Each structure stands twice: as structure tokens, then as C-alpha cells.
Image (spheres, rainbow, N blue to C red):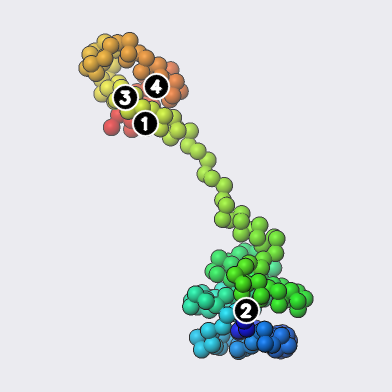
Amino acid sequence: MTIRILLVDDHKTMLWGLERLIQAEAPALELVGSASTADEAVALYAAQRPDIVLLDLDLKGSSSLDILPALLSNGVTRAVILSANRDQATLTAAVKLGARGVVGKEAATEEVLNAVRKVYAGELWLDQSLMQALLGQIVAPAPAANPEAQRIASLTARERDVIGMIVQGKGALNKDLADRACISERTLRNHLTAIYQKLNVANRLELYVYATKHNLHA
């Protein structure tokens, strides 16, 4: 199938060379238009619905990132960035906006053609450093676990009930608390021992302070 291509570049010499490159590959490749400004690019895109946009990142001092979403809005067109700019942040932003290929302007003509064919076929054409930069942002390290949250999450529903009684009891004896909970005093002590270990506290006073601080009595 013929791959229909729209060229967007404000460097006349570069544009001329790309036009000849694509025309030489006919009928496999077809040039449907050439634009040197953002407005021309958007108008030609709307009129031609190309398969591929070969897009220079810098158009007369303005960033092509501003029009990239519009050039991909039909869900069919795919973009290959042509760039002399090797700034990883800028190129990463282009890929996040939908570009599927990045080729340096210093690249050999065969590399440009390969990028067009691969992207048209649904593949990515990115160099190793850019791919690593993208993966580094997508696969971000998991946030560090909150040790206090883990301790509190380890409490059973019954243990949380006991903590609530301790806080509300405000110094009540174990026997009174056990009677209130309808359990034996020994069972209460067992619960307290488990709670102390889970929350890393030493006694009822420290438990009271911890529970109040972390709102465990509610």
C-alpha cells in the first residue's frame, strides 16, 4: 500500500531534499503536501488526512509540540519527528503527545525511510536513550511504604476495639476493661501483648499516646 506523507519543515533546503527523497520512492511513498508553518501544516492535514506527518520540531521559532495533538486528532495519522534538537525532555514530550518516531536531521536517508515504514506499520522508532528516558518516567519507583500505616493495618478488628477501650477507659484497670468487653483478663492481656508488638509500644501509656496521635480510638 502507498504511504501518504505530509512534510512539515521551515528549512527550505531540508524540505526540498525530503520532497525528492519521498518522490524517488513512488509508488510506495506519496507526497501529499509540504508545509513550512504551523497554520499551513494544520490546513494540509485537514485536507489530505495523511498516513504519516514528518514534522520538524522547530517552525520559525515556535514549537511544533503545540500543533502535534491537532495533527493526530483523526486517530489515523501518525507522526515522525525530525529534529536537530536532542533535548531528551522535549523529545519525550513529543512522544507523550503521540509521536511514534524520532529521527535526527543528521540521519541517513535510509534511516528516515525506515522510520516512516516502521511507524506506518504500527511500530515505534526511538533511539535507545530516548526509550530509556520514557521508560524511566512510565515505570516510576513505587513510593516508600509508610511504616506506621503498615503497623496500623496489621491490627485485627478485635485489637482495634481493645485500643478504643483503653483510650476511652483513661486508666481503668484491666479487670474492668475485660468485664466491659465480656472477655477474661488473661485474654485482654494477650490482646495487649499483640498490640504492643505490632505498634512497637511498651505499655498502656505509650499505647494511649500512640492511639490518640493516630486517631485509633474513633
Q: Which residue is mark 1?
A: 213
Residue 81 x %, y %: 64, 74
Mark 1 surroundings: few (<14), some (14-19) or many (≥20) residues within 10 A: few
- Which residue is at 66% across, 76% downward? 116
Quarter-wise, where is residue 44 in the image?
A: bottom right
The CA span between labels 2 and 1 is 58 Å
Res 215 seen here: yes
The CA span between labels 2 and 3 is 64 Å
Residue 192 x %, y %: 37, 17
Mark 1–mark 4 CB contact (< 8 Å) = no
Of the numbered discs 4 and 3, the one sitting upstream in the chain is 3
Numbered disc in front, either 2 or 1: 2
Residue 16 x %, y %: 71, 89
For the C terminus, the image quarter is: top left
Quarter-wise, where is residue 78 in the image?
A: bottom right
Q: Which residue is mark 4?
A: 195
Of the numbered discs 2 and 1, the one sitting upstream in the chain is 2
Q: Which residue is mark 2?
A: 55
Numbered disc in front, either 1 or 4: 4
Kind of residue at badge 4: Ile
Kind of residue at badge 1: Lys
